[in-house]
Amino acid sequence: MKLKAVVIDGELRVVHQSGVQFDAELPEFRTQGGVHIHTDRLTVTSPVLMWVKALDLLLDKMKRAGLDFSRVRALSGSGQQHGSVFWRRGASETLKHLDPDQDLHQLLQVCVFSVSDSPVWMDSSSTQQCEDLQAAAGGALRLAEITGSRAYERFTGNQIAKLRQTRAEEFQDTERISLVSSFAASLFLGGYAAIDYSDGSGMNLLDIRTRNWSEICLQATAPHLDQLLGAPLPSTSVLGPVSSYFVHRYGFSESCSVVAFTGDNPASLAGMRLQPGDVAVSLGTSDTVFLWLQQPRPALEGHVFCNPVEQQEYMALLCFKNGSLTRERVRNECAGASWELFSAALRDTPLGNHGNIGFYFETMEITPPVIGVHRFDSADCEVSSLSPQVEVRAVVEGQFLSRRLHAERLGYSIRHFVFSVPGTRVLATGGASSNKEILQVLSDVFNAPVYTIDLSDSTCLGSAYRALHGLVAESGASFVDVVKKAPEPRLVATPHPKAKEVRRPLYDDALLASEAEPLEQVKMM
Ligand SMILES: Nc1ncnc2c1ncn2[C@@H]1O[C@H](COP(=O)(O)OP(=O)(O)O)[C@@H](O)[C@H]1O
Ligand SMILES: O=C(CO)[C@@H](O)[C@H](O)COP(=O)(O)O
């Protein structure tokens, strides 16, 4: 988990990149993977001041590297979706008068946040609040029709309801609630930034058709919540100029525009210049699969968000919690903690893994909502272990099989695409998309060609593209036109000629078995 920055020039070339790793460079916050997992194993938070301090470090690194901030015409950004920041009463005054001689961490460490540990996307502790919200909205499907998703524990509205019920004093002391994205934008603006439609769709609070807060959801969550949230705005909005703090401390121009920040997945859609018909697979901390949608058709599984670059359109997304961290654990146990050895194991084992497969839901999964680890040998018998090399392939094939199954279900439910339709491109991004062997398995399991963009971090690049678009969006210029000079995605893997053949008997059988019986057992654990 990192805070990262990318700077592009007018030709869309990347001219600067920097990053700050939370665990390693800010050890005083004692996070693992950027988060604290609480003793109930359900509550997951991050210290909000760690994010603030990371921004100080990042901007200092960029300055030391010689970046001329005065040439930056616009900035935007993205944050992990769903996470929330609670500003204490009086914080807006503090934000307006930041002293450029001090760093942000010093200025904001006392009395600015009513909750010091922000709930993040990995949290799954608000089940009761989810049930309450669905009951108030008239059921899970009705809630999905309004907000694009049934109630999910990590969605911000349910986290807000939980905080109001369990920490009433802190809640009373809150004057504004931001998402991680609008929180970061607020720091640059020196005032509260609006939540954009796209990231706002991950809250179970926004009506994705009217693009306004849903009255039913607001009322079921907390009194006067609209005042705490502020009005949502289009994702392409210019929110204002950068604050005088950044002008004096880093030399930004007074006319540098702050364009609305958004969620990491929406930003990634922009960074990959996703087109209708493409399937994006993001292999970051979470694995996500997302598509461009023209019409919203919300279902009980998956999410529909407002589109971050085309105001009238949408995107569909599936999120899988047991992604990179699970692959890392198997790497540590079976491949000597080395990605090279992990990749070698994938090269040395055949597609289909001789019928061995595993499903590794080490923490409560989001899609599907189950927990437990199950391995099956070639005779479909459940086994307690596999040899190290086989285990490596089993985890990657099992993960992508599950991604494909749920994406196909989403595809069918929105009647949008079916894999193996000629021309379907899988666009891969996120940290693990730098691993060619992992991408080969993705291509084989999805039976489609896999493409990447030069930068494995499409969220950052997407934020830079969105900043550029924000400068001209009001005049009607389309995002596609603004980014047409960007390099085309590169083909990195094509499916093995036998992918389809091997897939049917081995993958689909294992898939049906896992989703029916074993997972039913898991559900009862
Ligand atoms: N060579 C590699 N092979 C497989 N996975 C990798 C490799 N390098 C990094 N990763 C994975 O990428 C993840 C980080 O991805 P990143 O996109 O930076 O995360 P985030 O979405 O949280 O910003 C790490 O958890 C790590 O497991
Ligand atoms: O919960 C979701 C999407 O709904 C996650 O995808 C978060 O947006 C965080 O992702 P990482 O960037 O940490 O993988």
Image (cartoon, rainbow, N blue to C red):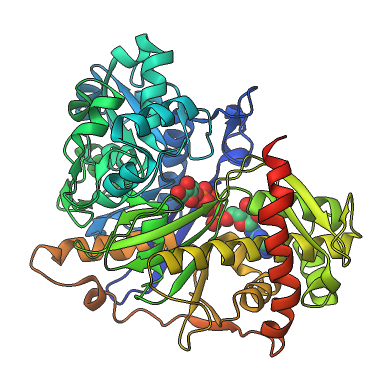
Q: Quadrant of ligand 1?
A: bottom right
Q: Is residue 498 left or right of residue 171?
A: right
| 232 on left or right of 391 | left
Asked whether residue 126 is in view, the answer is no
Q: Tag count in the figure? A: 0
- Residue 377, by quadrant, is bottom right
Whether residue 152 is situated above or below residue 456 in the rendered picture: above
Residue in the picture at 42% in, 41% down = 55
Residue located 57% across and 51% down the image: 285
**Compared to 477, does 23 lie above or below?**
above
Residue 286 in percent (x, y) is at: 56, 51
In the figure, 268 relative to 221: above or below? below
Q: In the orientation shown, which residue stands out farthest toward the right?
A: 387
Q: Percent x, y for residue 307?
A: 28, 60
What residue is rendered at 23% in x and 17% in y?
Answer: 90
Task: Name the one closer to the observer, 90 or 495.
Answer: 495
Question: Is 292 rendered above or below residue 93?
Answer: below
Residue 134 percent coordinates (x, y) = 37, 34
Q: Residue at x 47, y 39 (%)?
A: 54
